[in-house]
Image (cartoon, grey):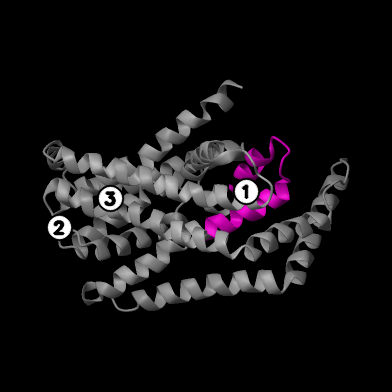
Amino acid sequence: MRDKVKPLLSLVAAGLAFAGIVLFVDLSETFAVVRDSDRRYVSVLFVSMTVATLMRGYVYVRLLSLVGFDGGLRRGLWLFLVYTVFRYTLPYAMAGTQTVLAYLSSRDERVDVEHAFGAVLVADILVYVPHFTLGAVGIAAYSGAVPDGTLVSTGLLLGGLVAVLCLGYYQRWIVYRAFERVTDLANAVLTRVGGTSTVGGASRVSSFYESIDRISASRRATASGVVFGHLGMAFLMLPLTVAGYAVGVTIPIELAAGIVMTTKFSGVLPTPGGVGGIEAIMIAMLVGVGDIGGASAAAVTLLYRLSTYWYLLLLGGIAALPFVRG
């Protein structure tokens, strides 16, 4: 029953977010703006997102290769696209779908799941931290029109993330202790319900840290992950500016970077891939900060999301067809 309620609540939350947008935006005028958009710029949106996907996918493949994955770039990118289906369709997917790509990468038994999980976790950091580093740079360049405290809150968020990562890496006993407590609880529950207490093994944590150490020892791989992660994010932020050109409005690239960064906070909403929340935040910022009309802001947001979220979801769905058939 609970598993059925969660998807329903997720859809309801997304519906409410879109309902809020409809109350403030004239949809007929928005669609008219989209119909009149410059198709040349619209095509650039999809090209930019394709480049972003390849660059970000490369980061995952590069790090997975360090822990034993030898499926090659083509297979690695294919698995990355399948991974995006889970990331873009599940609520709060940022917090738990790393195991999906780790499992998919280990199916051929060339790499341990724990090693693959460590590589995927590091790749996630290298790919998603640029949201905030590039976004902070954009806000700093556009700070004259950004509310006070934005830079401070961004800095605190990044600082907190770095602190947690450093604590988990240099004070490993904390992770071991937490894992021990969780496994003891899981085994107690299994025993209580009449099952076999098989959850455990600190060796899994050791394997995880082994993969982290192996990756950190390769400065070249880490540097390439940082570079390609930021380049991929730049090509993910660029479409917002291009979408503006498509409908005849100007959105400075620094503002686009700040807006894309801010939409990441929509992850607090229990909607699939932030659907509804991202659109609402983007429209609000384009109108309030970018001084763009409501219909134009909604049209820009629609084009941006079509070329990023829905386009990537389509590619991931096609990539996942063999698993569905299997």
**Residue 290 located left or right of residue 95:** left
Local SS, label 2: loop
Neighbour tally class for label 3: few under 14, some 14-19, many 20 plus, Cα within 10 Å: many
Mark 3 and mark 1: Cα distance apart in space: 30 Å
Amino acid type at image mark 2: Thr
Q: Which residue is mark 3?
A: 239
Q: CA distance from mark 1 to mark 2?
A: 42 Å
Mark carried by residue 65: 1
* Tag 1–tag 2 contact (CB < 8 Å): no
Q: Is residue 19 left or right of residue 98?
A: left
Quadrant for residue 221, please give it: bottom right
Q: Is residue 225 left or right of residue 42?
A: right
Q: Which region is colored magenta?
A: 97-125
Residue name at image x 53 percent, y 60 percent: 125
Is residue 324 shown above or below 116?
A: above
Q: Which residue is mark 2?
A: 250
The x, y position of residue 318, in whole percent, is 46, 29
Residue 115 among those drawn in magenta: yes
In the depicted view, which residue is nearer to us: 125 or 67? 67
Amino acid at dot 3: Pro
Distance, label 3 to label 2, CA atoms, is 12 Å
In percent of width and height, residue 10 lies at 47, 43
